[in-house]
C-alpha cells in the first residue's frame, strides 16, 4: 500500500510544514465503525469521494489483520484527496496503514508512548469526558482531544450529557484543538461551534442516516455558514 506519510520531507507532516500542524486537524471527523468488510469499505469510500474532511475508523472487536486491511484501503482511497484518515485506539495499525493519526481512549496508551510507534510526525488525539481529562491529555502530549457526550446519544443513552457550558469551559482551559462529540446534528451544530470548539465529530447522524453523503454535505454547509459569521 502507499501510505499517506511516505517520503515526506523532514519538518513536514504529510507534506505540510510542521508550523501549520494544528491546522491539519479536520474541522469535521466522521467516525466509521466496522459494519462488515464490504459495507465499511462502501461507506468510507463514499464519504471520501464526497470530500469528508476526516474519517476515524473504529473497530474495537476486529483483529489486527482485517483492521489493517480496511485502514489501508481508506488511506489508499484518500490519497490525492483532502480527507485525513485516523484509526481508533490501535497505534500499530495506524502506523502500518500510513494513517494521518491515531485516536486514543482516555484510559489507554499515553500520547507520548503512542508517538514512539510512528516513524513520521502524526496527529494523536485522545477521547475525553471531562475538563480534567482534556487538561491531562494536553499535558501528556496530545495534539487534539475530543469531548463527549455533549448531548445525549442513542449509542450511550446511560451517559449524562456534558452540555455546552462545560464544552466552552474545556475549550478555554487548553491550547490544543477540542472536537465536540456526542449527539451533534444539523439542528444543534451552530450552538456547538459557537462555544469556540475547533470542530465536531459525528457517527450516527451521518453513517446511519438514509443518505450519508447528503447528510455530510448538509453538515459541511451549516459549518461554513457559522464560520462566515464569526
Image (spheres, grey):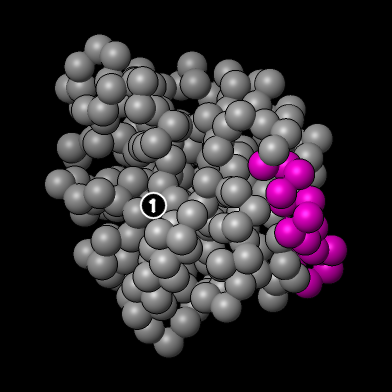
The residue lying toward the viewer, choosing from 54 and 155, is 54
Question: Can you tell which quarter of the image residue 137 is in?
Answer: top right
Secondary structure beneath dot 1 equals strand
Q: Where residue 155 sits: x, y (%)?
A: 68, 70
The structure residue drawn at horizontal position 65% and vertical position 53%, both measured from the top left corner, is: 195
- Relative placement, left or right, of 84 versus 158 is left
Q: Where residue 120 sits: x, y (%)?
A: 34, 20
Q: Residues within 10 Å of mark 1 (few under 14, many from 20)?
A: many
The structure residue drawn at horizontal position 65% and vertical position 27%, both measured from the top left corner, is: 138
Q: Is residue 95 visible?
A: yes
Residue sticking out furthest to the bottom:
210
Please state the total of marks drawn on the protein image.
1
Taking the magenta stretch, the answer to whether it contains residue 155 is: no
Question: Would you place residue 128 above or below residue 123 in this image?
Answer: below
- Relative placement, left or right, of 45 versus 199 is left
Q: Is residue 93 visible?
A: no
Question: Can you tell which quarter of the image residue 224 is in?
Answer: bottom left
The structure residue drawn at horizontal position 44% and vertical position 51%, both measured from the top left corner, is: 27
- Relative placement, left or right, of 131 versus 59 is right
Question: Would you place residue 100 above or below residue 179 in this image?
Answer: above
Question: What residue span does the magenta drawing correspond to?
Answer: 156-171
Q: Quadrant of the N terminus?
A: top left
The residue lying toward the viewer, choosing from 11 and 170, is 170
Give the residue pinned by disc 1.
54
The structure residue drawn at horizontal position 84% and vertical position 63%, both measured from the top left corner, is: 160
Q: Where residue 4 sits: x, y (%)?
A: 25, 36
The residue lying toward the viewer, choosing from 205 and 71, is 205
Residue sticking out furthest to the top:
10
Taking the magenta stretch, the answer to whether it contains residue 168 is: yes
Question: Can you tell which quarter of the image residue 152 is in?
Answer: bottom right
Q: Where residue 218 sits: x, y (%)?
A: 39, 76
The residue lying toward the viewer, choosing from 59 and 198, is 198
Amino acid at each position: 500500500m502507499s501510505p499517506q506519510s511516505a517520503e515526506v520531507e523532514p519538518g513536514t507532516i504529510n507534506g505540510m510544514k510542521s508550523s501549520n500542524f494544528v491546522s491539519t486537524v479536520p474541522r469535521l471527523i466522521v467516525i466509521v465503525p466496522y459494519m462488515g468488510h464490504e459495507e465499511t469499505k462502501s461507506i468510507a469510500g463514499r464519504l471520501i469521494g464526497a470530500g469528508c474532511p476526516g474519517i476515524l475508523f473504529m473497530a474495537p472487536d476486529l483483529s489486527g489483520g482485517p483492521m489493517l486491511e480496511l485502514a489501508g484501503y481508506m488511506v489508499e482511497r484518500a490519497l490525492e484527496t483532502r480527507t485525513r484518515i485516523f484509526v481508533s485506539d490501535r497505534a500499530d495499525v495506524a502506523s502500518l496503514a500510513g494513517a494521518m493519526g491515531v485516536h486514543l481512549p482516555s484510559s489507554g496508551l499515553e500520547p507520548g508512548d503512542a508517538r514512539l510507534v510512528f516513524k513520521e510526525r502524526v496527529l494523536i488525539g485522545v477521547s475525553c469526558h471531562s475538563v480534567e481529562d482534556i487538561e491531562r491529555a494536553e499535558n501528556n502530549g496530545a495534539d487534539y482531544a475530543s469531548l463527549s457526550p455533549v448531548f445525549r446519544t442513542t449509542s450511550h443513552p446511560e451517559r449524562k450529557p456534558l452540555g455546552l457550558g462545560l464544552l466552552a469551559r474545556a475549550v478555554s482551559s487548553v491550547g490544543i484543538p477540542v472536537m465536540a462529540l456526542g449527539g451533534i446534528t444539523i439542528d444543534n451544530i451552530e450552538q456547538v461551534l459557537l462555544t469556540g470548539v475547533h470542530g465536531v465529530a459525528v457517527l450516527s447522524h451521518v453513517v446511519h442516516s438514509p443518505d450519508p453523503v447528503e447528510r455530510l454535505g448538509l453538515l459541511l454547509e451549516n459549518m461554513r455558514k457559522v464560520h462566515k459569521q464569526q
